[in-house]
Amino acid sequence: DTEVTQTPKHLVMGMTNKKSLKCEQHMGHRAMYWYKQKAKKPPELMFVYSYEKLSINESVPSRFSPECPNSSLLNLHLHALQPEDSALYLCASSLGPGTLLNPEAFFGQGTRLTVV
Amino acid sequence: QKEVEQNSGPLSVPEGAIASLNCTYSDRGSQSFFWYRQYSGKSPELIMFIYSNGDKEDGRFTAQLNKASQYVSLLIRDSQPSDSATYLCAVYNQGGKLIFGQGTELSVKP
């Protein structure tokens, strides 16, 4: 089983709203990732959690706030977003972080976010 | 120079032919290499990974890695229309970041 579950699948939010994206995996993976993907572009790394600790933040604006409550869950809290933040937000997980054994990353189905 | 580079395509091949997708990377210390397939509007799906120099085969797919040349490729034999998608090359760099190339759009014509 290589399932990573993301909710919601679609989200429309206003620029003054606060919302959260959720990601869940039950594969015992210890690394979890948030990516942002715009149309016709590759996924762009935002955050990496390794053993429930934030290990990489790719200089993401503070209106995006990640959280890892436990080893199975990853959240992305959204506040005061801009229309240009509209994109597909992808969560991924891997058994080990990038430089260790079994770093193969599996992606969830993504959340299609539209900011109006 | 981009960390991971691919020809954006589109690459068009007839059904039954071999599709060859190429990727180069700049971080010589990279150890792990991946190919993802992404259908339009869907998320990336891992189809191959390779860690050692040489070839790795899985069904119709063969990944090839040459660390000295910093080059990784994907061959798809007996291409089918259902293989039409964007193929993303991804590399873990020494900083532990999984970095994607721009993707190559493949079109398999019946």
Image (cartoon, coloured by chain):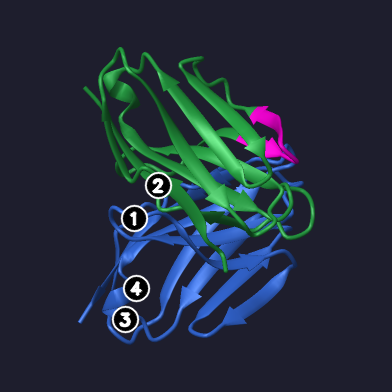
Chain colours: A green, B blue
For label 2, the residue is A110
Q: Amino acid at mark 3?
A: Gln
- Image height of B7 relative to B55, above or below: above
For label 1, the residue is B42
Which corner quadrant of the image does residue A95 belong to? bottom right
For label 3, the residue is B80
Q: Secondary structure at mark 1?
A: loop
- How far apart are the two marked residues, 3 and 1, measured between alpha carbons? 19 Å
The reply to whether callout 4 and callout 1 are in contact (CB within 8 Å) is no
The reply to whether callout 1 and callout 2 are in contact (CB within 8 Å) is yes
The residue shown at (77%, 46%) is B29
What chain does mark 2 sit on? A
Q: Amino acid at mark 1?
A: Lys
- How far apart are the two marked residues, 4 and 1, measured between alpha carbons? 14 Å
Q: Secondary structure at mark 2?
A: loop
Majority SS type along the magenta span = strand
The residue shown at (63%, 34%) is A68
- Image height of B90 relative to B84, above or below: above
- Image height of B60 relative to B37, above or below: below
Q: How far from the left and from the top, in percent, is residue B27?
A: 69, 43
